[in-house]
Image (cartoon, rainbow, N blue to C red):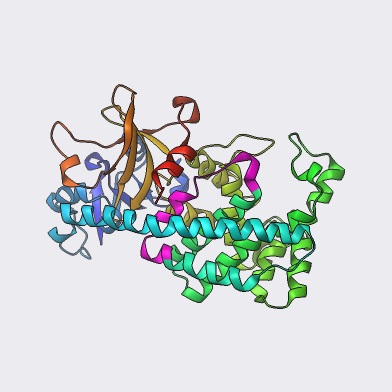
Amino acid sequence: MKVKVDVSQLKKGMYVSELDRSWTETSFLLQGVLIVGEEEIAEFQKTCEYVFIDADKSDETIYAHLRSLTTLTQESEPIKSSAVHDSEQAELEQHTFQKELKVARKLHTRTRTFIDHALEDVRLGQAVNTDAAKELVTEVANSITRSPHAFLWLTNMKERDEYTSIHCMNVCVMSVSFGRTLGMEKAELEILGLGGLLHDLGKMRVPLEILNKPSKLTFEEFEVMKTHPMEGYNMLKEQGDLPAEVLDIVKHHHERRNGKGYPSQLDGDQINNMTRIVAIVDVYDAITSDRCYHDAISPYDALKNMYEWVKEDFDKDMIEKFIKCLGIYPIGCVVELNLGHVGIVVSASEKSKLRPIVMLVLNSKREHFPKPKLINLAHPKWRTGAQKLEVRRILSKNDYEFSIKDIVENESII
């Protein structure tokens, strides 16, 4: 349902889906914007006379305001009061996350053990147990279907010195999650996950002095590094027990839309759709992880950077969908609330994008809680009054001193 709104009546929480002019006349990156602050409102007021609000994608907190407006389009339908997020829904959402987290934590450990063994098998020239990989990926897909964010929360358990194994697991999880938001069938999700899990096995054929070099690779060293997709592809193809789509992901996850990727310099539509998905997730996890040669950047900055790279590296439509998949406040980002509390985003609701589930780490005085507190900002008790809580801003790594990895690991213990 669309609602025509004069720009003077815009409020935080509204999702602007259409303008009275072309999006190119504005400074917004995406065609479709959830208003999160005064800056967006000011930009719309500067360039437009009216806009169209998608009520279904807007935050529930502004539904009453939308209902009161008299400039509804003729196609509009009455806004249903049942859309309001009540306490039972918020509590159920948080309970579902916590329940699935126990399942995901056990599966996370099993998957990590598998990928460690698989990497060692490749290093020793032995076959990879692809049957075990398929079984694990099926369970990962089932977990993400039950609760999309529990396993994503665990992808923040990253170690600089164990990058390759954790990266393979994270790419598997995030690829399945991304594919799910794109509406893929279960069989497709399992292919995506399998490709993500196995995509970097070929790195075990790269000399360790190159793979773990703490500085920029020379031209010659980078040429050796670029052999890893083909190494992984050839090795897995010889086993003869993997779908062609999985092998394509392993071989082409470093191809780019401008034809400057490797190993085949594919461009545009030559790159398989599933391979594009894994390629995007691969880059996102890489730049949000501490590596031997660079420090991680925040999830928010990573998405911003990747959007700027679309002209060269990625399909614009796919990047926009990935940004929407991870949300306004990506899981794992550190946020400051309006009363000064600091926490980590652990889950987000499609119906309440501005009010995620947050694990509070620091109180309003910036002191550590004895034990981090999990709260769902979508719960009515946090919406009004003296205890009203909402996200004020996303913090950079320089704004806090705690370890996200340690907190995720400690708070996910079974």
Question: For this rendering, which residue is in front, 378 or 31?
Answer: 378
Locate residue 201 relative to residue 284 in the image: left or right: right
* Residue in the picture at 31% in, 46% down: 357
Question: For this rendering, which residue is in front, 306 or 149?
Answer: 149
Q: Position of residue 190 (x, y in %)?
A: 53, 71
Q: Position of residue 191 (x, y in %)?
A: 57, 71
Evaluate whether residue 253 shows in this view: no
Q: Farthest residue to the right: give it.
A: 220
Q: Quadrant of residue 248?
A: bottom right
Evaluate whether residue 113 shows in this view: yes
The answer to whether residue 344 is magenta is: no
Q: Quadrant of residue 204?
A: bottom right
* Residue in the picture at 39% in, 50% down: 21
Q: Position of residue 160 (x, y in %)?
A: 62, 39
Question: For this rendering, which residue is in front, 385 or 48?
Answer: 385
Locate residue 204 relative to residue 144 in the image: left or right: right
Q: Position of residue 289 (x, y in %)?
A: 58, 42
Locate residue 267 relative to residue 389 in the image: left or right: right
Specify the principal SS of the magenta part.
helix
Quarter in which the N terminus is drawn: bottom left
Q: What's the magenta region?
A: 143-163
Locate residue 35 relative to residue 79 in the image: left or right: right
Question: For this rendering, which residue is in front, 7 or 351?
Answer: 351
* Residue in the picture at 46% in, 44% down: 409
**Whether residue 280 is situated above or below residue 396 in the rendered picture:** below
The answer to whether residue 157 is magenta is: yes
Q: Quadrant of residue 11?
A: top left
